Image (spheres, rainbow, N blue to C red):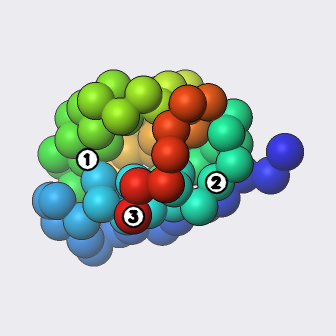
Amino acid sequence: MSMEFLDLRGLKCPLPALFARRALARTAAGGSVEIVSDDPLAAVDVPHMCHQEGHEVLAVERCDASVRIVLRRGAGCGPQV
């Protein structure tokens, strides 16, 4: 299964979570989305959105001023654009 990659550096809250939500909505159940963001709140906002909407957070890794977050779309989630 393929993984969508989003480079969200330069975008500030709430845009990283909104773009992650849209990417997950385009992804088939069980599919993955990887995002990179330099917004300090993305490491909190994106996992929070995922937990609220039934998606899984596979990884949150900080690297210098950026964070890499890997998400998996939940099986029972309908389209959420």
Which numbered disc, 3 or 1, marks the residue that appears first in the sequence? 1
Which numbered disc, 3 or 2, marks the residue that appears first in the sequence? 2
Q: Residues within 10 Å of mark 2 (few under 14, many from 20)?
A: some
* Quarter of the C terminus within the rendering: bottom left
**Residue type at the position of mark 2:** Thr
Q: Is residue 5 left or right of residue 21?
A: right
* Residue at horizontal 61 percent and vertical 30 percent from the top: 75
Distance from disc 3 to disc 1, alpha carbons, whole Å, reads 19 Å
Query: From what the image shows, is residue 10 above or below residue 22?
Result: below
Callout 2 secondary element: loop
Q: Which residue is mark 2?
A: 27
Disc on res. 42: 1
The answer to whether the residues at label 2 and label 1 have Cβ atoms under 8 Å apart is no
Q: Residue 25 placed where, x, y %?
A: 51, 56
Query: From what the image shows, is residue 36 above or below residue 64?
Result: below
Q: Residue 38 placed where, x, y %?
A: 29, 58
Distance from disc 2 to disc 1, alpha carbons, whole Å, reads 20 Å
Q: Residues within 10 Å of mark 3 (few under 14, many from 20)?
A: few
**Residue type at the position of mark 1:** Ala
Which numbered disc, 2 or 1, marks the residue that appears first in the sequence? 2
Callout 1 secondary element: helix
* Residue at horizontal 59 percent and vertical 61 percent from the top: 26
Q: Residue 9 placed where, x, y %?
A: 35, 68
Q: Is residue 13 visible?
A: yes
Q: Nearer the viewer, mark 3 or mark 1?
A: 3
Q: Is residue 19 left or right of residue 15?
A: right
Q: Which residue is mark 3?
A: 81
* Quarter of the N terminus within the rendering: top right
In depth, the one of 37 and 71 nearer the eye is 71
